[in-house]
Image: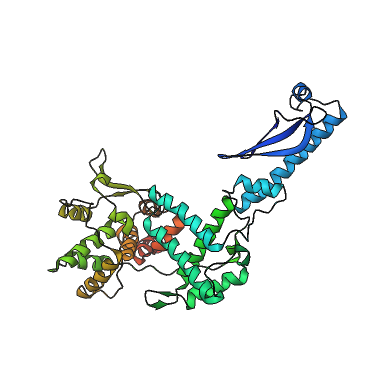
């Protein structure tokens, strides 16, 4: 937590030979100094053990009282900022304590805030902490801001001071009904909420850096609508698995799709796997061990027999554990596979992930805590979105109750 040490500023004296008292403030790996506005003779400071002893001189009692009030006010301001953002900059605390606003509305614009954040995010990507795809989404969010301001205000950038409540909700309306991307007009609600959360994240980063003192997007209260995840039943999964395709590209996509169904790996994670990610435990069981790119969480997934079959099939690959293919081609070819297998569902990469969470794991009695760990989720709520409760699980539990009452 906050650490404050009072000390004398060496080399500085007033006309009475007194040295000014400063406070060194530390929090996590940050450190700043603040002047208390009080001074004292060096020998009296040492004699009173930095004013910690019982004081007899009235002047020293006043100084001690002033320092106590200084510390109390500092802690109040610190706790207030901590509630807003646990990662705030101590420079912000210093400016707030001295009554100086850190908002530089005329000096920094909303696009500049996005650019600074995205540069910081790029460093995380370079370090392997976040995915390239996530960075691309933030860049897309910045481009949407520029498109919005061009249409709404006839300019490509604006001072942060002009990002008002009406700006935020006009932006939401633009994203939902007027934005253009890949020939489509408008963005669905959940994606709009995620974009505005990105603007919030960028502004909070600027707060931590001491560039601004508040997030103008904090007024936004849009909600993500939770929809049922599409997944394959075991019968549909078997239908795809038993189907042999004469067209090589379809056979390849089938294998990559099934690999995701039996491991739960998202596209960016599956594409980065190599033989180095395979590990054998003391019982001879094989595991895929890696960190999920989105959450940077370690996720260990046992190698099931269907997974091993696919790995063996592509063992001679020079790069990667399984073939690599772009999301766009993958989803396009999956549509063909669905048609040829008689499956009336819109197949995508994420249908495979949902299938792993439901049919492959929960449907076979795997506990949701273990499913959450294998999927690299940060909490159970994320897993509950993917893991639709299956009727077979409900019936198994209720059958025990039926026996009791029969």
Q: Residue, x 81% and y 36% (percent of image)?
A: 65
Q: In this view, does 201 lie above or below 151?
A: above
Q: Residue, x 38% and y 67% (percent of image)?
A: 229
> Residue 78: in sight, yes or no?
no
Q: Residue furthest right?
A: 58
Q: In this view, does 7 lie above or below 147?
A: above
User: Viewed as shown, does residue 332 lie left or right of 69?
Assistant: left
Image quadrant assignment for residue 161? bottom right
Q: Position of residue 182 (x, y in %)?
A: 37, 74
User: Viewed as shown, does residue 170 lie left or right of 233?
Assistant: right
Q: Residue, x 62% and y 51% (percent of image)?
A: 83
Q: Nearer the viewer, residue 159 or 203?
A: 159
Q: Position of residue 12 (x, y in %)?
A: 73, 30
Model colouring: rainbow
Q: Position of residue 167 (x, y in %)?
A: 59, 71
If the image is split into quadrants, where does the N terminus sit?
Answer: top right
Q: Which residue lies furthest to the front in this view?
A: 15
> Residue 355: in sight, yes or no?
yes
Q: Residue, x 24% and y 40% (percent of image)?
A: 283
Q: Position of residue 289 (x, y in %)?
A: 31, 46
Tally of marks: 0
Q: Nearer the viewer, residue 332 or 110?
A: 110
Q: Which of 284 and 7 is in front in this view?
A: 7
If the image is split into quadrants, where does the C terminus sit?
Answer: bottom left
User: Viewed as shown, does residue 38 lie left or right of 335?
Assistant: right
């Amino acid at each position: 937590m906050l650490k404050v040490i009072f000390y004398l500023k060496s080399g500085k004296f007033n006309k009475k030979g007194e040295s000014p008292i400063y406070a060194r403030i530390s929090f996590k790996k940050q450190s700043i100094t603040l002047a208390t506005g009080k001074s004292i003779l060096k020998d009296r400071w040492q004699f009173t053990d930095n004013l910690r002893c019982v004081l007899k001189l009235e002047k020293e009692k006043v100084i001690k009282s002033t320092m106590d009030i200084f510390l109390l006010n500092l802690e109040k301001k610190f706790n207030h900022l901590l509630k807003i953002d646990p990662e705030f900059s101590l420079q912000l605390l210093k400016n707030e304590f001295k009554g100086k606003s850190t908002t530089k509305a005329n000096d920094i614009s909303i696009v500049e805030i996005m650019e600074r954040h995205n540069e910081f995010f790029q460093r995380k990507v370079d370090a392997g902490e976040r995915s390239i795809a996530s960075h691309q989404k933030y860049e897309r969010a910045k481009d949407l801001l520029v498109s919005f301001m061009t249409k709404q205000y006839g300019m490509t950038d604006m001072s942060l001071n002009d990002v008002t409540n009406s700006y935020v909700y006009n932006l939401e309306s633009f994203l939902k009904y007027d934005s253009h991307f890949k020939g489509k007009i408008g963005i669905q609600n959940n994606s709009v909420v995620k974009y505005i959360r990105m603007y919030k994240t960028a502004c909070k980063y600027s707060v931590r850096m001491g560039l601004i003192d508040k997030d103008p997007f904090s007024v936004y209260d849009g909600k993500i609508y939770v929809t049922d995840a599409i997944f394959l039943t075991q019968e549909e999964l078997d239908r795809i698995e038993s189907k042999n395709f004469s067209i090589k590209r379809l056979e390849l996509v089938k294998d990559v799709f099934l690999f995701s169904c039996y491991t739960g790996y998202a596209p960016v994670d599956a594409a980065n796997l190599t033989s180095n990610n395979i590990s054998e435990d003391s019982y001879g069981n094989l595991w895929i061990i890696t960190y999920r790119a989105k959450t940077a969480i370690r996720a260990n997934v046992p190698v099931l027999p269907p997974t091993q079959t696919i790995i063996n099939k592509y063992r001679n690959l020079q790069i990667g554990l399984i073939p690599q293919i772009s999301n766009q081609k993958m989803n396009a070819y999956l549509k063909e596979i669905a048609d040829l297998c008689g499956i009336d569902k819109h197949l995508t990469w994420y249908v495979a992930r949902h299938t792993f969470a439901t049919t492959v794991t929960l449907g076979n009695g795997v506990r949701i805590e273990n499913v959450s760990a294998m999927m690299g989720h940060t909490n159970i709520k994320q897993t509950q979105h993917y893991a639709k409760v299956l009727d077979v699980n409900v019936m198994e539990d209720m059958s025990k109750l039926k026996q009791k009452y029969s």
